[in-house]
Each structure stands twice: as structure tokens, then as C-alpha cells.
Amino acid sequence: MLSGLPHGAFFGVGAVVASRLADKGKEAQAVSIMFAGLTIANLAGVPLGTFLGNHLSWRYTFLLIGAIGLITLVSLQLWMPALKAGKKENLAQQLTFFRSAESWMIMLIIAVGTGGLFCWISYISPLLTEVSGFSRDAVPYILAFAGLGMCAGNLLGGRLADKFSPSWTVLSLLLSMSISLIFVALLSEYKILALGMTFITGALAFSLVAPIQMLVIQSARGSEMFAAAVAQACFNVSNALGAYLGGLPIAAGYSFTAPEWVGVGMALGGAGFAAALIQFKKRTSMQQALPL
């Protein structure tokens, strides 16, 4: 619990700082580069930590994490550009973020829509071994392949959010992820196709990160840090919901492809909230344009 406490604050502050450091028009790409660290950690750090734990001791894994944390702390102190503090607001002012209908729509997009990712990734190991027929020894390498897809998708999402509206980008990517999960459920018994869909689904899932962060930052002028941290909390809610709801059909005796269908429903639910957000913004802009 103590190790997890800084998670939301770190990525929330990191997203805002990255957007402020970026050139105008490239804010989402900067956010995606910051989150690329997370995908690289999945690609390299998780296998390394597992290797140390299996061959030496689990304590060495945690010592490595602590050492990397200290290096990060020193690096931030030495090289992070000094940024002016934003407008100071007390907690009561920051909590007004929850009074906006737009904010709640964004939170629901994250908590429900990205649950499709966690329905899939939470049960990917038995999916690969029991349905696709891969050996257990092959699973870490396939997960690394999924990590490559996440790296690529994360950077792609940043470019798309800078080129198009973040809200339309989120809607399109959630619809794409739902289609991808359908293909995962239908094609996982074929090894080559299963590998391809593992890469594609990982890419689509992480392509959502930067556009969602930009949605949050743009909707919370003056309390961006607080809102970005709330977004990370919503991602964790999504993690819990996706893993729980995706596990229900397995517990009921259905195939390991069943979580994907739950994931399709969650991704489509998120897409519905994204469509509602687009309509809400359109209606609000029209009302603001009307003469008094």
C-alpha cells in the first residue's frame, strides 16, 4: 500500500509537467513520451525484476527498485527545468473539479472504457497457454512483445491527440479497442494470429493514455495537477473493475476468451461516455456563442 501511494501523484504531476515543457501543439506527444517510461518498464523492468527474484532473491528486486528511485530523484533535482508554480488553490477550490459534468464524463471514460485493457491483460497468461497452446516458458516473451505494442501505441496516441481533438481520438480508439478484443476472442486459438492480436491490442490500449491525459488537463484549468492525479486514481479503479468483472465468467466455468467479451462491453461503455462528452462540449460551445 505504501509503495503504491505515490503512483497517482507521480504520473499526474508528470503529465502536467510534460505538457508544460512541450512546444505548442505537441503537448500530447510530450505526455506520451513521459508515459513511454511506463511501457519500457513493462518491457524491460518486469522481466529483469522477475529474473532477479527467481535466481537470487525477491529482496534484490526491491533493492533495485529503491536504487532506481534514488537515481530518479537525483536526476529530477539536477536536470528538470524549473517551472513557475501555477495559481495556488486550496483543497476546497480544487475539489470543484467534481462539480463539472464534463469531469465526471471523463472519469467514467477512464474507469469504464479502459477496463477493456484490464479484462484482457489480467488473464492473458491462461489465454495464451490454455487457448492458444503456447508453453508457459513462452509467455514472458509474448508479454514483452505486447510491451512493444504498448510502446508503439503510446507514441501513436500522442501524435493523434495533437493532430485531432482528444475527445474524438479517445472515442475512435475505444471503438477500435472493442473491435480488437472481439478479434482476440475469435482468433486466439491460432498461434500466429494470437501473437498479432497481442501486439495490436497492446498498442490500441496504450494509445489511449496521452489523449485521455490531455482531456483531463484541458478540462481542469487551474487545477490540472489535482485532476491529473484523479485520472490516475480512475485508471486504478478501471484496473480493479476490469480484473474483477473479467474474472466472473471464468469463475462461472466459461472459456478464457470470455473476459474479452466483458472487455468489449467496457470499451463500448467508455466509447458511449466519450460520445456523450463530445455532444456536451458541442452544446456548451453553442450556448456560449449565443448573444446575451
Image (cartoon, rainbow, N blue to C red):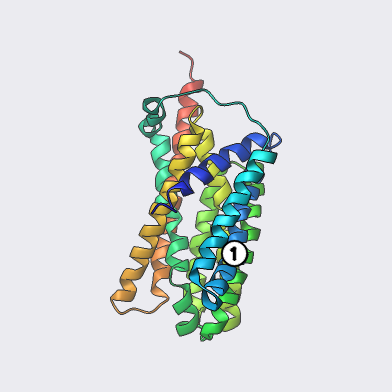
Q: Is residue 20 above or below residue 243?
A: above
Q: Is residue 156 above or below residue 58?
A: above
Report whether 197 appears left or right of 182: right
Which residue type carries mark 1? Gly
**Quarter containing the N terminus:** bottom left
Instruction: Report the residue at 59% width, 56% height from top.
Output: 67
| Residue nearest the observer in this picture, 63 or 289 | 63
Please state which of residues 42 and 246 is positioned toward the viewer in this rendering: 42
Q: Which residue in the protein does label 1 denote?
A: 45
- Does any portion of residue 75 appear in the rendered image? yes
Residue 235: image location, x then y, percent: 44, 51
Q: Is residue 72 above or below residue 97?
A: below
Q: Residue at x 36, y 31 (%)?
A: 99
In the shown orientation, is residue 161 left or right of residue 97? right
Q: Which residue occupies 36% across, 58% down?
A: 241
The quarter of the displayed image where residue 60 is located: bottom right
| Residue 169 place in picture, x, y as percent | 57, 48
